[in-house]
Image (cartoon, rainbow, N blue to C red):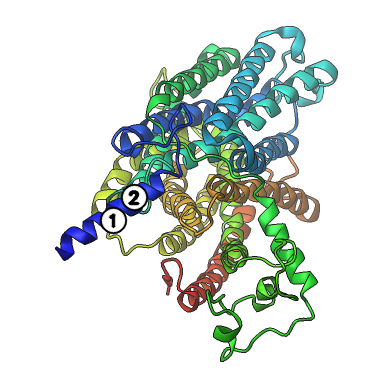
Amino acid sequence: MEASRKEQDLKAEVKVSEESTLDWRGKPSNPQKHGGMRAAAFLLGLQGFEIMAIAAVGNNLITYVINEMHFSLSKAANIVTNFIGTLFILSLLGGFLSDSYLGCFWTTLIFGFIELSGLILLSVQAHLPELKPPPCDMVKDSAQCVEAKGLQALTFFVALYLVALGSGCVKPNMVAHGADQFNQDDPKQSKKLSSYFNAIYFAFSLGELVALTLLVYVQTHSGMDIGFGVSAAAMAMGLIIIISGTLLYRNKPPRGSVLTPIAQVIVAATRNRKHVCPSDNTISDSFPNSQPTLRFRLLNKACMKKEEGESSKWRVCSVKQVEQVKTLISVLPILCCTIIFNTILAQLQTFSVQQGAAMNTRLSSSFHIPPASLQAIPYLILIFAVPLYDAAAPRSITPLRRLGAGLLLSTFSMVAAALVERRRRGSLLSIWWIAPQFVIFGVSEMLTAVGLVEFFYKQPLEGMRASLTAVTYCSYSFGFFLSSVLVSLVDGATGWLRDNDLDKDRLDLFYWLLAVLSFLNFLNYLFWANWYSSGVRVGGDGDGDSVV
């Protein structure tokens, strides 16, 4: 009897949760027909094709900007990092529109077509000679090369930032929409959610692998116009796939502006600032129905009524609303600890590609490896490693511990890069010498990227799933913007990156600087992760894991 009652209660909980999601007609979703891994598979398909399209553009963009648009190495590096940084910060717009007004599905679809239009325009710009400067050799005769200006530059940057706008808004929503297919109130589906996050990275790795081998090969041997066109075709295929799964999705409806509840807590706490916060011993008397946690106790004033009968949410908020704002504040230091990590990622997509170009790329008498394809090495390993990790890794490896391991590994990636660059200077090494730095960082990215998304998505913040996922992409943005600032500062202060010739530059010293910054960042992460965990244990929410 008791077991039967528990089963009925569980079904009732699942039913209540499912009623908060809708099918394609706007009716309550049916757990037997909608959601689950079957529906999420369509989002994984979009993930693979979208990253295939954008990676083929981003990872070889520096070569195109230098060789065909004729920007200098430092300018080209900043163009690439600014593009990727803008792309990821625009994810905030995508998350906001989704949670507040459009929902994940429609936001993904609308901005997916914007991304597709940018890729098509980029292909047209690369194909038409009048939209590019006259051909010349930037390595041997850079002084005679004319930098792209006027209509040429305008067309290029419009196309590039249409891609950034579209991809930035698509990324958090396709991840969040896929995760929304699993009901966290159902224990079985909750376990599958972690597998889904690993599957995301598998699809990501597979898309990157195809982009960095097949698509980069097409760009190198058939021209960038054909390469960009293939990227557009890949994006179009991804859009077809997501549309094909429309009948299977469970959709979480938007709940209005996600910023309003946060603003209400801040305004109410400010208005009630003269109230005396209750002590630890009297907090249960002040809040008899639901007790707020003690961290950021000044925000607890937002729950305190000045007068009986006050109902305006701009004067008094619920304890749940206040706790959600506290949770949002508590996770921000964890996010900030991944910024240096993404600054290192920026180097692998800019300077490490140029590093490979300065090495012996010959694999046989007739075949040369495109330097940008070196970034495919870690993804080749990861398409086997991710399924093994999902099957073998114990569930006790929490997102915070996974994050910590990834951040530490990124330090060794820069150490390997510095040692190889030191040996490369003055000698012609095989391009395979820089493979270790990509392999180490690939494993590091698997741990860090998936751990961060899972950590944020599982926070108890209702109606903000897409926005929280978007926040994780801001780390990429800040990391790439920091890379631009760091390159400019280091170049101005030391001259390490001033020349277009890596044999004259001191890229090895720049890599050592990043290795030191990465290790200091890891120590900083240990502090904040344990600070977060101690607060969770006191408050009683979340996994409460520690990384030490």
User: Which residue is more in the foreground, 128 or 155?
Assistant: 155
Q: Residue furthest right?
A: 150
For mark 2, does the 10 Å Cα neighbourhood hold few (<14), some (14 to 19), or many (20 or more) residues? some
Q: Could you tell me how far apart the alpha carbons at marks 1 and 2 are, in whole angstroms?
A: 6 Å
- Classify residue 189 as left or right of residue 333: left
Residue 534, relative to residue 467: is it above or below?
A: below
Q: Residue furthest bottom?
A: 281
At label 1, the amino acid type is: Leu
Q: Residue at x 31, y 45 (%)?
A: 385
The disc at residue 442 is: none
Residue 87, relative to residue 541: is it above or below?
A: above
Q: What is the x, y in percent for residue 305?
A: 70, 74
Residue identified by numbered label 1: 10
Res. 145 in view: no
Residue identified by numbered label 2: 14
Considering the numbered disc 1 on the image, is that residue within a helix, a strand or a loop?
Answer: helix
Q: Residue furthest left?
A: 1
Q: What is the x, y in percent for residue 493?
A: 79, 56
Q: What is the x, y in percent for residue 22?
A: 45, 36
Q: What is the x, y in percent for residue 245?
A: 40, 25
At label 2, the amino acid type is: Val
Label 1 with label 2: CB-CB less than 8 Å: yes
Q: Quadrant of the N terminus?
A: bottom left
Q: Residue furthest front?
A: 309
Residue 286, relative to residue 125: is it above or below?
A: below
Q: Residue at x 70, y 47 (%)?
A: 481
